[in-house]
Amino acid sequence: MTKEEKVEQLEAINAEVAACEKCPLHQGRTHTVPGEGNPNSPLLFIGEAPGFHEDQQGRPFVGAAGQFLESLLRSIGVSRRQVFIANVIKCRPPDNRDPEASEVSACNDYLDRQIAAIDPLVIVTLGRYSLNKFIPGQRISRIHGQPRRVGNRTVMPMYHPAAALHRGSLRREIEADFAKIPDVVRAARQLVHEQPDEPPPTIDPTPPPEQLSLL
Ligand code: SF4
């Protein structure tokens, strides 16, 4: 799929999300937060649900957790605009409560279609809700930082950045897990290259080359 085709598909999903009333969360939203970023990124980050600031701006990870995520990205030489960032849930749950199973289920198709359009090499799950989508029944405290193959992709479980803001002891663990990402991407790319039927992944040529060296 060309970048233009990916953008077209993602914009179509955004338009559907903007009009979505499939679950009660549409009633309290200010903006939908479908996700944003580089549609050609080999890395897709998936968090949980929009919070207050995300709901206000219609963008994912723009509050304190977002600032920490951006610093984590910088620590591996990657800028926010080089990757794609989305959430399991596209509308803010009231008072930032946990999403309900019925809400996750109602919203699931949008995320599946985003993944299909972006076709990332590596999905980084941030928190237990996105972990549960790919690796159900596992505790994040046991498998964070341990990449595994799920279908034809690599899934890298991580704590949610907000968790480190609430529990300072997790900060070093998240930083250590993030430091593994470049090697995880390289290993995933190597696997793709070993499958001759699949074309090699493309990457947006616009970002500065030195920042792409780690990816
Ligand atoms: S959370 Fe998802 S399913 Fe629910 S209204 Fe928003 S976009 Fe629709």
Image: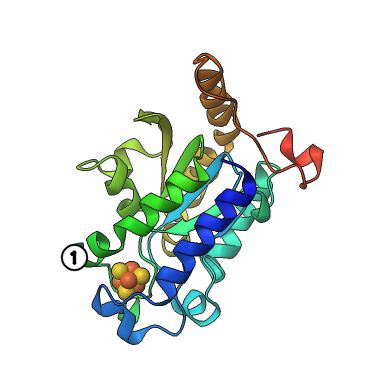
Check disc 1: other Cα within 10 Å, few if <14, some if 14-19, many if 20+: few
Q: Is residue 120 left or right of residue 111?
A: right
Image quadrant in which you'd find residue 68: bottom right
Residue 194 in the image: x percent, y percent? Answer: 52, 13
Q: Residue 195, can we see it?
A: yes
Query: What quarter of the picture does the C terminus occupy?
Result: top right
Can residue 50 be seen?
no
- 193 relative position to 110: left or right: right
Q: Quadrant of ligand 1?
A: bottom left
Q: Position of residue 65 (x, y in %)?
A: 52, 64
Identify the element where label 1 is drawn: helix
Residue visible at 46% across and 44% down in the picture = 124
What residue is shown at x 47% (from left), y 58% (from top)?
Answer: 86
Does 136 sit above or below residue 86?
Answer: above
Counting from the top left corner in percent of width and height, residue 115 is at 44, 47
Q: Ligand 1 within 8 A of label 1's CB? A: no
Of residues 156 and 120, the one nearer the viewer is 120
The residue identified by callout 1 is 102
What amino acid is at disc 1?
A: Ser
